[in-house]
Every structure is written in structure tokens, then in C-alpha cells.
Image (cartoon, rainbow, N blue to C red):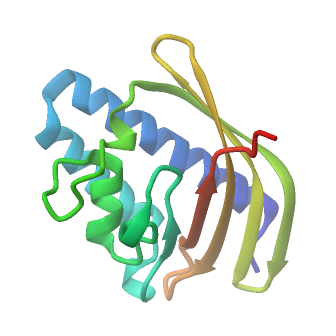
Amino acid sequence: MITESELAAAREAWGAGLIAIAKAYEADGIDAAREVASRVLDEAYGYELGPVLFKPTMASGDQTFRPTRAGALSYFVGHDPDFPLDGGFGLKGWRDVRSETAATFIDGDVAMWMGWVHMTDADGQVTTADKSWGYSKDADGVLRIVLHHSSLPYQP
């Protein structure tokens, strides 16, 4: 059974991964960022389980939804001619990521979380995203993201 502490650890690991991508890019360029992002995807997401239902914050048109690892990698680091609108969300100088839970649902080896994720860049600017993550444990008992929906808060 998935626990609340496992969900918290998964969110913290995702945030640490986002920061690591940004720092790798700043220190060593796009190839280093791509390598770190690849590792983050392999550690956090469940692409080996099937398509990941990934709707990034800043994606649109025919490429709004990213069920493949290649689509997710491009979203985080850009520089992929197959995804020409991607600017590399992970390259934006992130320095801090914290989450705020609205609700969770846990049923055995499947769990869902929704809430806000507050991401602070190197200039101290905070971007808040509404996020929902769905998780499943793989055959080794590792929690994997199988659904990732993100959007900017509605501005009436």
C-alpha cells in the first residue's frame, strides 16, 4: 500500500530533479541538462509500465499531451525538432520547489495527489502550477508517476 510519506518523498524527488536539470544546464549546457533530465524521467516516471498521461503546463495544440518519454524529455529540456514549441521548462533556473496538498487518494498500489507546486527561480520569481499526479508501484515496489497534469491557475 502506498503511504502519504511515499507520496511526499516522490514530490520532493520530482522537485529536486527539476532543480538538478536547471543547475546542470547552467553549469554545463544542454547536453548535461538532457542527461540529468533523462535520469529524472527514468527514476520518477513509469514509462516502462505503459504510456504516461502527461499534460505539461506550457504545451499546446497537437502536442498538448505527452504520453511518450521523448515528449516529456523535450518538454523539460527543449532542443528537439520534433517538438518545436518547447522552450525547456527545466532550464528556467529553478532553485526551490515546494508542494501544497489539496487532496490525496490512495487505493493499494495506486495513488493520486493534487495540489499546488510553487517553483522559485534564481531571481526569486515564484511560478505556481496546479498539479495532479497519479502514481503506481512498479514490480519492484518503486512509486512511479503514471499521470502528470499541470496547468497555470485560472485568472478570472
Query: Which quadrant of the rendered structure holds the N terminus?
Result: bottom right
Q: Is residue 112 left or right of residue 26?
A: right
Q: Is residue 132 above or below residue 154?
A: below
Query: Which quadrant of the rendered structure holds the C terminus?
Result: top right
Image location (x, y in percent) of residue 107:
81, 84
Residue shown at 43%/84% (left/top)? Answer: 51
In this orientation, which residue lies closer to the viewer: 19 or 86? 86
Number of callouts: 0
Image location (x, y in percent) of residue 65:
45, 71
In this orientation, which residue lies closer to the viewer: 136 or 85? 85
Residue 41, by quadrant, is bottom left
Residue shown at 82%/49% (left/top)? Answer: 101
In this orientation, which residue lies closer to the viewer: 24 or 51? 51
Q: Is residue 11 above or below residue 144?
A: above
Please identify the residue farthest to the top as the structure is shown. Answer: 123
Residue shown at 77%/86% (left/top)? Answer: 108
Residue shown at 20%/22% (left/top)? Answer: 27
Please identify the residue farthest to the right as the structure is shown. Answer: 103
Q: Is residue 20 left or right of residue 1?
A: left
Q: Is residue 109 above or below residue 135?
A: below
Residue 60, by quadrant, is bottom left
Q: Is residue 116 left or right of residue 42?
A: right
Image location (x, y in percent) of residue 69:
32, 71
Q: Is residue 33 above or below residue 2?
A: above
